Amino acid sequence: MRRLTGLLVAIGLGLVAQPDKARAACAPLQEADSLIASLNSADVFRLGALRETALDQGCTPDERAQISRWLALAMSQKAVREAQSYEEALPLLREALDIAGIWQVQNVLGDAARDRRDFDEAALRYQLALQDAELLADPASTYLDLAPSREVFQAINAKVNDTRLLASGFVTLPGRPACQLQTSNAWIAEVVVPIQFVTNETVMTDKGSEAAEELFSCLSALTPSEIKSITVIGHTDERGEAAYNQDLSERRAQAVKAYLENRGLQLTLKVAGRGESELFQPDDAFNYSQEERWQMSRRVEVDVIKVEQ
């Protein structure tokens, strides 16, 4: 198991402590703000005590929830600072997760699952990280200052794409389709969909059919007047003859288009096949074997272009 290098930075990305920000009169929260300003050495024991006393000192549910977030973040910092491997860090990370399901902890748990090649678990954790990040980035959020930056959000989204393509089954979250196009941080135009097919065929696997159904739900939620074009794009890996791969990618894109139209999608769809010309680029190719990179390349993407405002 590899050493946890760089995670002390990664687990706190996007966090902006603001001890001078106007707060309600909640002394435990004010002290927690001060403690967490020194993120790498935050006092876990003291933060735990503040969390316990917050209710008695009149802190609101939102204020108590923020102290819990600080505590979970400090515990995860401690885990990655002191552990020699993901395996050693996991017990404290899971304890932190029980306190608050913050995106930083979900993200690192996703990395741990990916490291042990459990792509189903990794895909779930990364999607939970995005879910929390989106809630925080909502302008109405009490914790807007705790949201990740756009760059970090996009990096987590890239890991969602990687691991969903590699998962043994279809992995998504109820109420939050992974193909969601509009987020609080970015409009994601090119959606990677884990639609898989029987080898050398245009027949979808069970996982592929579930992914296609999710894509239907996602596209059905769009407002037609806001969309300029939608293109379903088929891709293959680089093995085999280029002409065959080109033809296969086109036929698979046509199969997805036919599925969506037969389900009743009212939007106009274009199709394109790219064959082996645009191999999938994972967030970090060194994390994956050649076979895994081939599997990620065998994909369907949907390119959604909005009408310019």
Image: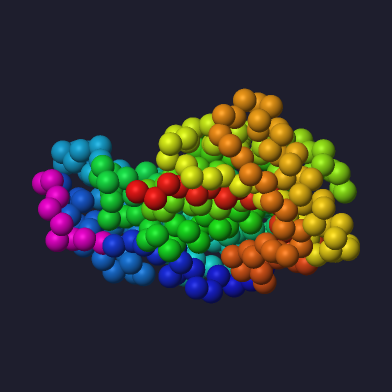
Confirm whether residue 31 shows in the render. Answer: yes
Query: What residue lies at 66% left-to-right and 69% top-to-bottom?
Result: 285
Q: Quadrant of residue 256?
A: top right
Q: Position of residue 140 (x, y in %)?
A: 26, 42
Q: Position of residue 236 (x, y in %)?
A: 77, 57
- In the displayed structure, would residue 264 be above or below residue 59? above
In the rendered structure, the answer to whether residue 266 lies left or right of residue 306 reads right
Q: Quadrant of residue 226?
A: top left
Q: Quadrant of residue 291?
A: bottom right
Could you say which is closer to the camera, residue 143 or residue 43?
Answer: 143
- In the displayed structure, would residue 37 be above or below residue 251? below
Q: Position of residue 123 (x, y in %)?
A: 60, 49
The secondary structure that most of the magenta stretch takes on is loop
Could you say which is closer to the camera, residue 118 or residue 230?
Answer: 230
Query: What residue lies at 21% left-to-right and 51% top-to-bottom?
Result: 29
Query: What residue lies at 47% left-to-right and 35% top-to-bottom?
Result: 224
Q: Position of residue 145 (x, y in %)?
A: 27, 55
Confirm whether residue 51 shows in the render. Answer: no
Query: Is residue 19 highlighted in magenta?
Result: yes
State the extent of the magenta-drawn residues as a range: 17-25
Could you say which is closer to the camera, residue 31 or residue 202?
Answer: 202
Query: Is residue 39 highlighted in magenta?
Result: no
Query: What residue lies at 25% left-to-right and 37% top-to-bottom?
Result: 61
- In the displayed structure, would residue 40 be above or below residue 76? below
Q: What color scheme is it?
A: rainbow
State which quarter of the image contains the N terminus: bottom right
In the rendered structure, the answer to whether residue 19 lies left or right of residue 241 reads left
